[in-house]
Image: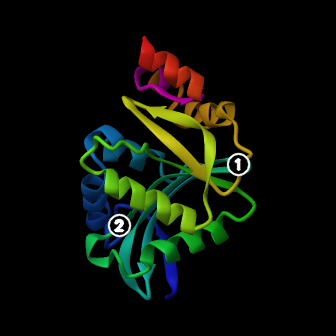
Amino acid sequence: MRMTLKRVKTSLPEYKKVKELYLTAFPPEERPPFFLIMSKTGKRDVDFWSIYADERWVGLAYVISQGDLSYLNYLAVSESERGKGCGSAIMRTLKRMYEGQRLFLALEQLDEASPNNNERIKRRQFYAKNGLKPINFMIQEGSMIYDVMGTSEALCPEEYDKLMTDYFGRLMTAIYPVRALTKQEKERNDNA
């Protein structure tokens, strides 16, 4: 399977498909408005990719980078292409493209009470199968708390905080909390 990535622009023929996938693959509490992520696209160190397998559109990826750090903020495969190996092919392609970078992502925490806990388990297994390892801190984005996995365990909370403050700006991060949490901070918040 030959993977091709094209930058998302309004002139891209699959632009509407990319937008629809973004809006349907991620719940509202897990995604900023589409216009906001598009406004950051094309700026230094922000890559919004439309992804093709053998010329067939299959999904999207959104990566925010700073120095040798790259945050795979969004990855989604079109529903019609799931279960065909596209996700793993995309991960191999992204790892090659961002070689030398510490590629990482956030994923929902496991929660037996959650109706989609089986999906969460499968996602974690998928990323582990594709070479990502757990990283020892969590991320808060808005009201959501996520676990972190990456290609390198050498990632510290302060690096994530700086990356996101530079991406969103200080005002936006004050309005929409985006920060790393240690396990102790999370426990203090849970007990408060």
Residue in the image at 58% along x and 73% along y:
93
**Residue 11 — which label?**
2
Residue in the image at 36% along x and 75% along y:
58
Please rate how many residues cluster around mark 1, counting C-alpha atoms within 10 Å: few if below 14, some from 14 to 19, many from 20.
Answer: some
Residue 149 in the image: state x and y as whole percent. Answer: 58, 51
Do we see residue 133 in this rendering? yes
Report the side of 160 relative to 100 (left or right): left
Please rate how many residues cluster around mark 2, counting C-alpha atoms within 10 Å: few if below 14, some from 14 to 19, many from 20.
Answer: few
**Front residue (pair 48, 124):** 124
How far apart, in angstroms, are the residues tagged by discs 1 and 2?
38 Å
Q: Which residue is mark 1?
A: 153
Q: Return the residue found at the far front.
A: 112
Residue 116 in the image: state x and y as whole percent. Answer: 28, 51
Say which label, 1 or 2, has the lower sequence index.
Answer: 2
Q: Which residues are magenta?
A: 173-182
Residue 30 in the image: state x and y as whole percent. Answer: 35, 42
Q: Is residue 72 depicted above or below 95 in this figure?
A: above
Image quadrant occupied by the C terminus: top left
Report the side of 171 relative to 155 (left or right): left
Q: Is residue 144 depicted above or below 57 in this figure?
A: above
Residue in the image at 54% along x and 29% along y:
179
Q: Amino acid at mark 1?
A: Glu
**Front residue (pair 3, 157):** 157
Residue 106 in the image: state x and y as whole percent. Answer: 50, 46
Q: Amino acid at mark 2?
A: Ser
Indicate whether residue 138 is drawn in magenta. no
Indicate whether residue 174 is drawn in magenta. yes
Report the side of 28 relative to 99 (left or right): left
